Amino acid sequence: MTRSKPPKYFVLDTNVLLHNPESVTSFEDNTVVLPMTVIEEMDNFKRHNDELGRSARQVIRKLDRLRAQGNLRDGVQMENGGILKITVETQDMPGLFMDMSVPDNRILAVAYALQSEGHRVIFVSKDINSRLKADALGLDVMDFEKQKCDFDALYTGWHQISVDGELVDRYYQEETLTIPNGDFLINEFILLQDESNPKHSALARATGPETLSHLVKERENAWHIRARSKEQRMAFELLLDPAISLITLIGRAGTGKTLLALAAGLESVLNGETFEKMLVSRPVIPMGKDIGYLPGTKDEKLSLWMQPIFDNLIYLMRLNHRLEEGTVQSKVDKLFKDQHVELEALTYIRGRSIPDQFVIIDEAQNLTPHEVKTIISRAGENTKMVLTGDPNQIDNPYLDSSSNGLSYAVEKLKGQPLYGHVTLSKSERSPLSAIAADFL
């Protein structure tokens, strides 16, 4: 007779719950342990008027519902068959020499005590330092893996295939081209390259698993910006296609992802009149505080944080109007005065329904998967959303290139008819920008 293995005890750090409020139910039929310090930290976060505060309140409400089923100290059964416990820390642990005034150490003490009692314990944290300390105590440690993807193998939005030269010629002659067993994803771009002459090639867009269609000539440029690479051409194809509602653009600094999105937004709002306005936002991460800690009114606070957006808008207006600097600035100011462009903090987007708008979320690599889901779900009728960012440059201390919301969205949404993605690799900002990206 086979004896079943004893259940594991997963001790969760506070940051895991803030990263994903549903994480308590993510460990199957095992025991999830929340140290009392975690509950106290949730209590501190619940007052915040941001995504962390909302996550804390969601966790607290979930725990309160579970409390109705029994005593949380003894453990209550969850719907997935697991047990949830809240444990009070022991201040004096033999063999454990740590400063118990530090919250992280009190959380680790719970995991250490459970392991000393003979349980199979795994400490789960998004904080690298906490995982290092846990490892030094002889504990098994792990990051929260549920919403992670393999960034090195992330979908790029296009790939190249070698074909017979006759097939390339046929593609140019026909409206669509069928390639048996193509196994293409919808809205994926395919570079058809002549196997005997690499310069003889064609760029196509998949409209079915075996069907390739031509790119639309009218989508080669927007707001006097022309695509400088095949990847930028792919981006414009998606940005200017009214049938695509969600686009993700990934690329290092200088690849043009934000500039292309803004150019397409201005073109669609002012010339195409497809949308009522363009809404631009970005997470306020590197400041370490909410925008309320910056000086001035809400608009003045946003203008400080949105300076890269202003720089791009000034560049675009100069290209379009060929005017002096002062006049260019007045044109940019008029965009906001006439409400063609609006800047908004992500904090205030939750709860809104956003119809008829071209929405750009810049620096989206600093968002969690839960935050990205929240933002995308705000889209109303006739709204296009564009998420841009570089997963190799993350300021959020609890995210990395594989666990951030931008990478997660790319992995989960590829192949959806309303969605398109392009990874831009070549820096087009300037030769200096390119060598900085390559060598520094």
Image (cartoon, rainbow, N blue to C red):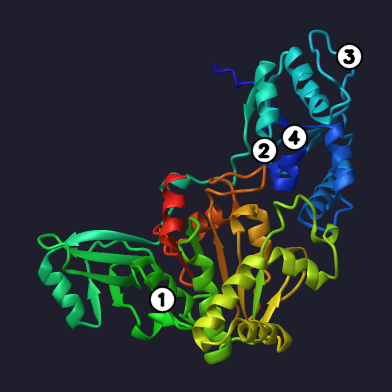
* Mark 2 residue element: loop
Image location of residue 368, percent across then percent down = 65, 52
* Mark 1 residue element: helix
Distance between mark 2 and mark 1 Cα atoms: 37 Å
Residue 126: which disc? 2
Indicate the quadrant containing the N terminus: top left, top right, bottom left or bottom right. top right
**Residue at numbered disc 3:** 92
N-term-proximal mark, 3 vs 1? 3
Please identify the quarter of the rendering in which residue 183 is found: bottom left
- Discs 3/1, front: 1
Q: Residues within 10 Å of mark 4 (few under 14, many from 20)?
A: many
Q: Is residue 345 visible to the viewer in this orientation of the structure?
A: no
Q: Amino acid at mark 2?
A: Lys
Which residue: 28% across, 68% down? 210
**Residue at numbered disc 1:** 237
**Residue at numbered disc 4:** 13
Q: Amino acid at mark 3?
A: Asp
- Cβ–Cβ under 8 Å for marks 2 and 1: no
- Cβ–Cβ under 8 Å for marks 2 and 4: yes
Q: Amino acid at mark 1?
A: Glu
N-term-proximal mark, 1 vs 4? 4
Left or right: 158 in relation to 225: left
Image location of residue 146, percent across then percent down = 59, 43
